[in-house]
Image (spheres, rainbow, N blue to C red):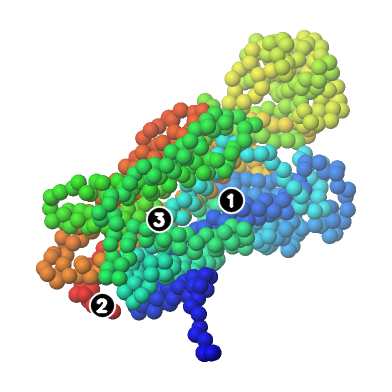
């Protein structure tokens, strides 16, 4: 007998898909309240996704910066003979300068044909006296703030450099036409400006700093995304209990909960992408710590983007399923297990202990330039250790509030609220707690790396060094006189020098040629007259010479070509070196112009280096701006370096600026995410707060109770952050074999974290007063 077949119930993947879709429908069909929950989750997830996409764009930004630098300056090698003169060839030389602490990129250009090659971003080749400048430099030159720089560059602006010729939108850069570069030292001849700028590997200590910083900055973002995925958990559990009443089993309820969390996560991904595009378009007008980028360079790496798109919804589902482990969803209501069974601590200690075990074997492995950093092991150890803060905080809050009794009414309301449900309050501050713990550890590591990357010297901060090439002795003496005559300069010194190679041992000796007055500033001379020469240093010292020794003179130091031989006079006396701020060598030959033959002086004409120093009159570096202008007019390729007690490596400065920008971004994310989390919690408590107000409870009492319910987890979280931060910092310093110098670094970091929480709490107060109105008694 045959009959009509009934459709079979879905099984396997079809069953899972059906329950997920049903959960997604529930998320968007709950009326205004349902949409509010979804939007809050989406906003929380979107903020985290935006930061992750920006972080995923860092490799693209760095690669673009390198490409732009190679495209406009990779061909400059310092050897003009490598390119033959042609209708496209261009002579060029450095003309970098500094203005009010800002570095300005500059090149002088001289065309050698009728179709000279143009630098990238330059439409019209500048003729002598003309300039093509970056948009930011043009804005500065047109303003009153750039009057001194406008006087220094002294050129007619005929155009601006397009984006492809700049490293960033806020860069100060210019190309100026010239007609006197032929034969000038350090002049390049090019037909194409592109090439490859090679640089050595980064110091392993700096690599460690970057790796640790990335892990510390990204981890709070992941925590915030997981927290946002659990918004509206209590109301969701109530809906699932109702579904159990109409026949849904526990696995089905869990799958529906996963579907609800997917809606907020997917909307958050979409909204995060939109926010990323908005932030990307605004980056050209933002400059932080002298860092600016073009929007076109901000492109997330495809593998990292795909990973974010997969991990965000997967993480949201996992966070929801983990949250439901402590809830028994029954047809007639909910039973929250943690109300009767306290949280266990032992398994919460496993991740930080594993993290510590991963870091301790690496002790002493990052101590020299040849060391390597095990990035995977370091990142894993850091993440596990900091993850312990998030795991231990709910247990600590539960244990502490469970023992609190009595006190004022607001205090009792806050404590009772935490005793009933401390998980939400703990999750709200877990992100900032992890961020503070990581910042403490990073600050300890940062201090050690800064000491490693800093060269300390005992110098006067009001001094500056001057150097240049292509000088004659007469020109060096004139420049020295000009330095002394500059307004605001109290003392100045300078001399012309050249290197000579000893034939016997191929050792290079510095030969200083100057008058007796200048030589007396470099050595203790018993007497001096034109035609004499002197020897500094003890016999046998490196860089020293002997009376009667022949030296092959060369024009540009140890790498130059020797073309003239000069014999040190046999009558040369040995004299003691005199300390000089010019940092002159302590060995070598001091010669008056008459000690060299006329043919030798003629050969060295315009081949000397100039080394000098100046000291300001009023104890500040302000007069150096006028001095830079004078030097630029004399020779734009000359360099002036401000001396400092401490000199920090360029790589460390760049990394510290980038980390500061990243820290500011994460701090803004923390504040925004905490505000969204606080609003979500107040919205969930709207009915009970409205009921208390309706029964006569004062609003001030309820407001104080909300503040106390925030303050207790915050104080406990900050205590954990200090403990774990100092522990992680100690473990990281062991990698460098360095002892902690300051154990109180947690004070400013903790204060900053508390300040962010206080600001967020203050911003949430208007919403608190609103939810305590009678309208909160309404339901849907």
| Label 3: few (<14), some (14–19) or many (≥20) C-alpha neighbours in 10 Å | many
- According to the picture, the residue beneath numbered tag 1 turns out to be 149
Name the outermost residue toward the front: 1
Residue at 27% across / 52% down in the picture? Answer: 341
**Disc 2 on helix, strand or loop?**
loop
Marks 1 and 3, the one that precedes in the sequence: 1
| Residue under pointer 2 | 779
The percent coordinates of residue 212 (x first, y second) are: 51, 43
Q: Quadrant of the C terminus?
A: bottom left
Say whether residue 747 is left or right of residue 439.
left
Distance Cα–Cα, label 1 vs label 2: 68 Å
Which sits in the foreground, 152 or 336? 336
Disc 3 or 2, which lies upstream in sequence?
Answer: 3
Q: Residue at x 50, y 62 (%)?
A: 314
Q: Is residue 658 visible?
A: yes
Marks 1, 3: nearer the viewer: 3
Q: Secondary structure at mark 3?
A: helix
Kindly report the distance in space between the C-alpha atoms of the residues bearing marks 3 and 2. Answer: 32 Å
The residues tagged by marks 1 and 3 sit, at their Cα atoms, a distance apart of 41 Å
For the residues bearing labels 1 and 2, Cβ distance under 8 angstroms? no
Residue 317 x %, y %: 45, 63
For label 1, the SS is: helix
Residue 368 as seen in the image, left or right of residue 609: left
Camera-side mark, 1 or 2: 2
Q: Quadrant of residue 572?
A: top right
Which residue is disc 3 drawn over?
670
């Amino acid at each position: 007998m045959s009959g009509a077949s009934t459709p079979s119930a879905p099984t396997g993947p079809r069953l899972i898909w059906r329950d997920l879709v049903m959960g997604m429908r529930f998320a968007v069909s709950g009326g205004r309240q349902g949409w509010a929950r979804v939007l809050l989750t989406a906003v929380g997830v979107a903020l985290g996704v935006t930061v992750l996409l920006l972080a995923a764009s860092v490799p693209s930004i760095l690669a673009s910066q390198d490409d732009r630098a190679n495209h406009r300056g990779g061909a400059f090698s310092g050897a003009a003979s490598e390119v033959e003169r042609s209708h496209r060839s261009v002579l060029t030389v450095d003309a970098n300068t500094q203005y009010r602490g800002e570095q300005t990129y500059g090149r002088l250009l001289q065309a050698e044909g009728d179709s000279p090659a143009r630098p990238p971003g330059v439409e019209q080749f500048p003729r002598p006296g003309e300039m093509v400048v970056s948009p930011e430099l043009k804005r500065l030159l047109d303003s009153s703030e750039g009057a001194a720089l406008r006087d220094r560059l002294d050129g007619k602006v005929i155009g601006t450099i397009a984006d492809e010729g700049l490293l960033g939108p806020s860069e100060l850069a210019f190309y100026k036409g010239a007609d006197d570069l032929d034969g000038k030292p350090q002049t390049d001849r090019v037909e194409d400006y592109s090439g490859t700028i090679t640089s050595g590997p980064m110091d392993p200590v700096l690599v460690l700093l970057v790796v640790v910083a990335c892990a510390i900055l990204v981890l709070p973002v992941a925590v915030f995304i997981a927290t946002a995925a659990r918004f509206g958990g209590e109301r969701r559990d109530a809906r699932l209990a109702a579904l159990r009443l109409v026949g849904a089993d526990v696995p089905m309820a869990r799958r529906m909960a996963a579907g609800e969390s997917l809606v907020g996560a997917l909307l958050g991904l979409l909204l995060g992408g939109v926010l990323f595009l908005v932030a990307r378009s605004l980056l050209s007008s933002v400059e932080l710590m002298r860092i600016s980028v073009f929007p076109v360079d901000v492109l997330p790496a495809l593998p990292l983007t795909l990973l974010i798109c997969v991990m965000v919804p997967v993480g949201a589902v996992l966070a929801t399923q983990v949250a439901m482990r402590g809830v028994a969803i029954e047809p007639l209501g909910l039973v929250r297990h943690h109300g009767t069974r306290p949280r266990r601590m032992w398994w919460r200690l496993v991740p930080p202990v594993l993290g510590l075990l991963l870091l301790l074997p690496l002790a002493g492995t990052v101590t020299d330039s040849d060391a390597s950093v095990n990035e995977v092991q370091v990142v894993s150890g850091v993440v596990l250790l900091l993850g312990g803060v998030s795991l231990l905080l709910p247990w600590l809050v539960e244990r502490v509030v469970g023992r609190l009794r009595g006190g004022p009414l607001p205090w009792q309301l806050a404590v009772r609220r935490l005793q009933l449900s401390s998980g939400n309050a703990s999750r709200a501050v877990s992100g900032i707690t992890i961020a503070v713990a990581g910042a403490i550890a990073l600050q300890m590591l940062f201090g050690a790396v800064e000491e490693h990357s800093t060269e300390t010297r005992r110098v006067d901060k009001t001094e500056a060094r001057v150097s240049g090439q292509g000088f004659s002795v007469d020109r060096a003496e004139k420049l020295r006189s000009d330095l002394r005559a500059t307004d605001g300069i109290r003392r100045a010194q300078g001399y012309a020098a050249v290197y000579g190679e000893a034939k016997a041992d191929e050792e290079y000796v510095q030969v200083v040629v100057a008058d007796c007055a200048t030589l007396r500033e470099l050595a203790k001379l018993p007497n001096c007259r034109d035609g004499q020469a002197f020897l500094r240093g003890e016999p046998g010292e490196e860089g020293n010479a002997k009376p009667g020794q022949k030296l092959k003179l060369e024009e540009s130091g140890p790498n130059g070509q020797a073309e003239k031989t000069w014999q040190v006079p046999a009558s040369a006396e040995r004299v003691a070196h005199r300390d000089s701020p010019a940092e002159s060598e302590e060995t070598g030959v001091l010669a008056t112009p008459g000690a060299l033959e006329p043919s030798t002086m003629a050969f060295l004409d315009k081949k000397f280096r100039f080394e000098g120093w100046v000291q300001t009159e009023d104890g500040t570096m302000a007069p150096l701006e006028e001095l830079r202008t004078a030097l630029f007019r004399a020779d734009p390729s000359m360099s002036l370096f401000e001396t400092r007690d401490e000199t920090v490596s360029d790589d460390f400065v760049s990394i510290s600026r980038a980390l500061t920008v990243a820290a500011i971004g994460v701090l803004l994310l923390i504040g925004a995410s905490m505000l969204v989390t606080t609003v979500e919690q107040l919205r969930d408590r709207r009915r009970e707060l409205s009921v208390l107000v309706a029964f006569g409870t004062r609003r001030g009492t309820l407001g104080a109770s909300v503040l106390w319910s925030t303050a207790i987890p915050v104080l406990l979280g900050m205590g954990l952050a200090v403990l774990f931060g100092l522990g992680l910092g100690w473990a990281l310093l062991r990698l460098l074999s360095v002892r902690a110098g300051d154990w109180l670094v947690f004070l400013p970091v903790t204060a900053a974290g508390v300040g962010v929480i206080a600001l967020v709490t203050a911003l949430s107060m208007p919403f608190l007063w609103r939810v305590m109105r009678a309208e909160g008694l309404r339901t849907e």
